[in-house]
Image (cartoon, rainbow, N blue to C red):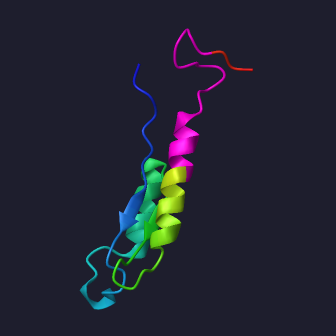
Amino acid sequence: KIGKVPVILVGNKVDLESEREVSSSEGRALAEEWGCPFMETSAKSKTMVDELFAEIVRQMNYAAQPDKDDPCCSACNIQ
């Protein structure tokens, strides 16, 4: 059985507003369609980079939690 894979849609290079090809609203709409978080970052200006890594960890921790109604395998003991 394949586990849940965490997904985060990230728009990068938010510091280059004049060269934008995808609007924030388009990114948010796609993330909503996919059912995942959306963030915009800039490695150059260090905008939202730490927050992105924190969200990655949150998503990984959430995906690692087995659903009580749908355990990942017969060896799981959820209490």
Q: Position of residue 44 (x, y in %)?
A: 33, 83
Say whether residue 61 is magenta: yes
- Read off the magenta span: 58-76
At x 48%, y 52%, the residue is: 36
Q: Quadrant location of the N terminus?
A: top left
At x 54%, y 60%, the residue is: 54
Q: Which quadrant of the figure has residue 10?
A: bottom left
Identify whether 21 is placed above or below 19: above
Q: Position of residue 47 (x, y in %)?
A: 45, 80
Q: Nearer the viewer, residue 11 or 63?
A: 63
Q: Position of residue 45 (x, y in %)?
A: 39, 85
Identify whether 59 is placed above or below 4: below
User: What is the residue that sits farthest to the top in this orientation?
Assistant: 74
Say whether residue 47 is magenta: no
Identify whether 76 is placed above or below 15: above
Q: Is 77 left, or right, of 18 in this rendering? A: right
Identify whether 10 is placed above or below 59: below
Report the number of numbered marks.
Answer: 0
User: What is the residue that sits farthest to the right in this orientation?
Assistant: 79
User: What is the residue that sits farthest to the bottom in this orientation?
Assistant: 18
Q: Quadrant location of the C terminus?
A: top right
At x 36%, y 80%, the residue is: 14
Q: Nearer the viewer, residue 20 or 67?
A: 67
At x 44%, y 62%, the residue is: 29
Q: Main secondary structure of the magenta part?
A: loop
